[in-house]
Image: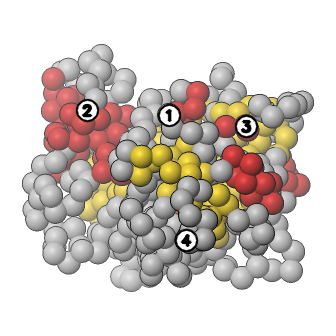
Amino acid sequence: MLPYFNHVNHVSQGGNISYCGAASVMMVLSLLPSKPADLGEFYTLTQVKDHDWAPGYYEGSSPKGISSTIQTKFAETGSSKKSLYTVCPVCDREALSRKICWALAKYKATPVALVYGANHWVVVNGCKVNQAPVSSSDPLFTIAYLYLHDPARKYEDKLGIPHQEVVSYSEWLQRYLIMPFNDGRITAYTDKFIAILDDDPPGTCQDGSDEAAEYADEIVAINRCTAKNASDLLLHEEVFKYAPWDVFPGHVTALEPSTVREARGDSCLISFVAKGSRGPKKPVVLMMRVGVSDGKFRSALAADPSNMAMFTSDTTLNGKSGPEVLNTLVKTDIPIKVGGKRRVFIPDPSQRPLSLFWEPCKESMSPYLPFYAVRAREKNGDSGKRKSETIYVRMDGKAFRSLTPVPNSGLELEGFSNGRGRNSQTGSEHDRRGER
């Protein structure tokens, strides 16, 4: 297998879902001598009118805004790479994916791709293929993995350590490129998959045959969400046989796996700690997502091996069973900051064991940050008048009184977009350890 990889610095969008495009631009530009000022500045720069994609129409950065901002910054440094960042709408997800690999292999460019319909920008900074692409439309090479930097991830806030994500090609097609841009009001992009990369011609469309196959939703007799299955994948999955991922087999131990309910097939989320770690502050160095029903590798997230830690297990709800999570929350309560005031919620200790779920929403655009739905009552006030409500506790410990699903992502969960979490103020966020 041939790897093509560009080292860029990961940049988080922070708590603002609209900043994913700006964060992606900062990642592409991260190796230039002149450093970007801040996310807000680049968000303004990328708010460019693009056909009918006008500022205020969509909250996020427009394709033209991302392209023009990258081109301008490269031109300021005298770089010839500015021509490698044009808007590329393609009618076929596979044709776009092959063109992304071509850009990485031929030009060493770092494409920015629009995923989950029209809802999120990510950076594709690498791929692994069986042979070198000979053109932007080459249909003969096989794609095994794509390497991503997703601005939605916020785990790096814990220790300030950069992360790298790798996804199988099937996961890329079936999750990230689940559906094209489908807002008919912007006809230039309707039914297209969009990326910012070179203007070499893509391959031809497949005349409707380019439908992403669904993962199996039903759980088979043997549930493959086990630490053993994940450990076996470390030994046999191709990506872990090559640097830098080859540092993990034999040197990490799996924590308690968690099943995450997802549209188009549930996943198993497993965290790995350095072998021999003891005590509550185990360093988590690797996370993996595996299909529950088929046991196949979907994606992995790791810290830079030279640092060998993303966060410690005591700072999140990672690696805990449902009963352990509930017990933790019952002991600490759930403080939430609403309208500048701190309000505390007490979980019901008698509720059913907690389980995880995820779909793209403003509170989490990353499958590595799923939620627990916790039944709780507000602590203060007349106990007879307190009503139970659902609080959504994200795996990193932050919680919300409601969640805001993004439209037309193609990954909607039944019962989620139809009213789940519309209890109160949207987006009220807290850290379960108290105000930051």
Q: Which residue is drawn at 46% across and 34% down?
A: 10
Q: Where is residue 325 in the image (x, y as percent from the top left)?
A: 74, 54
Which tag, 3 or 2, sits closer to the chain's start? 2
Across and down, in percent, residue 84 comes to 26, 40
Q: Residue 81 carries which label?
A: 2
Q: Residue under circle 3?
A: 314
Which amino acid, by three-letter code, is at mark 3? Asp
The answer to whether residue 421 is above or below residue 325 is below
Q: Is residue 21 visible?
A: yes
Outermost residue, top side: 33
Relative to residue 43, is residue 354 drawn left or right?
right
Q: In which quarter of the image is the N terminus?
A: top right
How much space separates mark 2 and mark 4, taking CA atoms?
A: 63 Å
How far is disc 3 from disc 2 in space, using C-alphas? Answer: 44 Å
Element assignment for label 1:
loop
What kind of element bears circle 2?
helix
Q: Distance between the residues labelled 4 and 3?
A: 35 Å
